[in-house]
Image (spheres, rainbow, N blue to C red):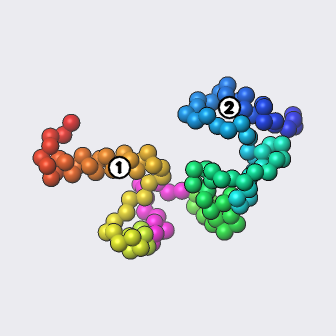
């Protein structure tokens, strides 16, 4: 079946099967380029939201897409269970750039928040003598 997805059908699917923590605008986006996005009907918009700044460089920037493709064709992802040939160089650059001794890269804000809380708790245990738990 090759029926074209309409905005109405896409919104109905999300409303029926998705749990919502936002109330999205009634626009169903299907592609983007630079600061512009298009809905499934082909209407063009300026993307003033930029995915809440996650794509402030614009959609589908050719250098970023190229870097993503190159990396995905080389090695998709390594967990922190292994060393990476790229991570140490990145860590050196970022710590020198910002003037810090160390960096702990995280995948998401939730992981960063969790690690920050653990660091605060450890500091309280070690420096303030607060009992664990």
Task: Single out the residue that lies furthest toward the left.
Answer: 129
Point out which mark residue 35 bears. none
* Residue 2 shown left or right of residue 54 in the figure: right
SS at mark 2 in the image: helix
Q: Is residue 85 magenta?
A: yes
The residue at the point 62 percent across, 62 percent down is 57
Please, is residue 99 above or below residue 13 in the view? below
SS at mark 1 in the image: helix
What residue is shown with label 2? 14
**Residue situated in front as seen by the camera: 75 or 97:** 97
Q: How crowded is the residue under tag 2: few (<14 C-alpha within 10 Å), some, or many (20+)?
A: few
Tell me where residue 53 appears, x and y as whole percent: 57, 54
> Are the residues tagged 2 and 1 within 8 Å (C-beta)?
no
Please, is residue 68 above or below residue 20 in the view? below
The residue at the point 31 percent across, 46 percent down is 117
Per the rendered image, the range of residues in magenta is 77-90
Please identify, in this view, whether the residue under mark 2 or under mark 1 is nearer the observer: 2
What residue is shown with label 1? 115
* Residue 127 shown left or right of residue 44 in the figure: left
The residue at the point 55 percent across, 34 percent down is 21
């Amino acid at each position: 079946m090759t029926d074209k997805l309409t905005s109405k059908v896409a919104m109905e699917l999300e409303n029926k099967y998705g749990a919502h923590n936002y109330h999205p605008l009634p626009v169903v986006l299907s592609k983007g380029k630079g600061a512009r996005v298009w809905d499934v009907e082909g209407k063009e918009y300026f993307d003033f939201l930029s995915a809440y700044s996650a794509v402030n460089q614009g959609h589908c920037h050719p250098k970023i897409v190229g870097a993503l493709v190159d990396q995905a064709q080389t090695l998709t992802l390594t967990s922190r269970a292994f060393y990476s040939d790229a991570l140490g160089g990145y860590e050196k650059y970022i710590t020198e750039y910002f003037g810090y001794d160390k960096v702990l890269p995280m995948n998401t804000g939730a992981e960063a928040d969790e690690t920050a809380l653990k660091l605060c708790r450890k500091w309280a245990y070690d420096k303030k003598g607060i009992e664990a738990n």
